[in-house]
Image (tube, rainbow, N blue to C red):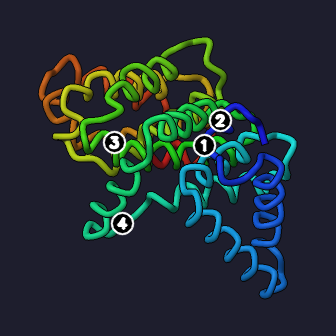
Amino acid sequence: INAEYGGQMAQWSMQELEQILAKALTFAQAPDLRLRNEAEEALRVLESQNLPGFLVGLTLWMRNTSQPLTTRILAGIILKNHFNTRDPLKMSQIQNKWVSLDQDTRNAIKQMAVELLADPTHEIGSTASAIISTVAVIEIGLNLWQELIPNILVPTITNPNSPPNLKESTLNTLGFICEELNSKALAGKTDSILTAVMHGLIDENDNIKFAAANALLNVLDFAKKNFAVTAERSYIMSCLLYTSPSPRDRQKSR
C-alpha cells in the first residue's frame, strides 16, 4: 500500500497491512462460507486494533489501481458503511465515531475520496461519491467541511475542462448530499448548488444530464425562493426543457 499516509498505521508494517487487507477483501467475496467468515473476522480485528489505520488503509486500497476492481469497490463500501445510517437514533453515535478520529485521518480520507471522483472506472467514482456524501452529511451537519460544496463540488461541475465522468460523479455527490441534509444545514448554498445543477442540465453528455436531473429533484425543497423569482424560474424551466430532446428514455422521463 502507498506509504503516503503510513503514519496512520503504526500497529502494522505496510507489508503486513497490505497482506491482511489483500486476503480479507478477496476472501470476503469467496463462495466458501468459512473463508468469508474468516475474512470478516480479520477485518473486525483490524478495525478494533487501529480504526484510523484501518480506514485509511481501505481508502488507499480503493485508490490502488493495481488491485482487482472488485476488492477496490468492496474496500470503499466497507468504509462508507462505517459511517452510514438511516436510523436517526444511531446518527449521533456515528457522528461521534467520525469526529473522534484525528483531523489528519479525516482529512486524508476526504482528500483521497474527492480525488477518486475522477477515477475512470464508473464503479469507483460512484463509490467515492457515496463515501463523500456520507461524510458530508456528518460534517456539514456539524458545521464542518463548509468548503466542500462551494469550493470543490460546484467549481468541478461548472469547469468546462472537467472530464465527463468527473462531472457526473460530482453531480451525483451533490444530489446525495441534498437528499440527506435539510435546508438549514445548506443555508446560503442553494444558489451555487442550483448553478451547478443548471450547468449539468444543459451539458451535451446524457450521463451528466441525468445526474443533474436527479440532483435537481433533491434540490427543489431548498429552491422555493428561486422559483418565486420569475426570471430564475424561467431559466430553470428552460434548462429542463433543454434536456427533453435527449434520445435516452430515462432522461425523457425526468
Tell me the crowding category of disc 3: few under 14, some 14 to 19, or many 20 or more residues within 10 angstroms, Cα based: some
**CA distance separating discs 4 and 1:** 29 Å
First in residue order: circle 4 vs circle 3: 4
Per the image, the residue denoted by label 4 is 86
Per the image, the residue denoted by label 2 is 5
**Whether residue 235 is situated above or below residue 56 in the rendered picture:** above
Per the image, the residue denoted by label 1 is 8
Residue displayed at 80% across by 55% down: 16
**Whether residue 172 is situated above or below residue 82 in the rendered picture:** above
Q: Position of residue 80 (x, y in %)?
A: 53, 55
CB atoms of marks 4 and 3 within 8 Å: no
Tell me the crowding category of disc 4: few under 14, some 14 to 19, or many 20 or more residues within 10 angstroms, Cα based: few
Residue displayed at 47% across by 40% down: 106
Taking depth in this image into account, of 72 and 3 the one nearest to the observer is: 3
Taking depth in this image into account, of 96 and 82 the one nearest to the observer is: 96
**CA distance separating discs 2 and 4:** 31 Å
Q: Nearer the viewer, mark 2 or mark 3?
A: 2
**Whether residue 96 is situated above or below residue 174 in the rendered picture:** below
Q: Position of residue 149 (x, y in %)?
A: 38, 28
**CA distance separating discs 1 and 3:** 21 Å
Residue 213 is tagged as none
Amino acid on which disc 3 is placed: Glu
First in residue order: circle 1 vs circle 3: 1
Per the image, the residue denoted by label 3 is 139
**CA distance separating discs 4 and 3:** 16 Å
**CA distance separating discs 1 and 2:** 6 Å
CB atoms of marks 1 and 2 within 8 Å: yes
Q: Secondary structure at mark 2?
A: helix
Taking depth in this image into account, of 175 and 130 the one nearest to the observer is: 130
Amino acid on which disc 2 is placed: Tyr
Question: Is residue 59 found left or right of 27 in the rendered image?
Answer: left
Q: Quadrant of residue 222?
A: top left
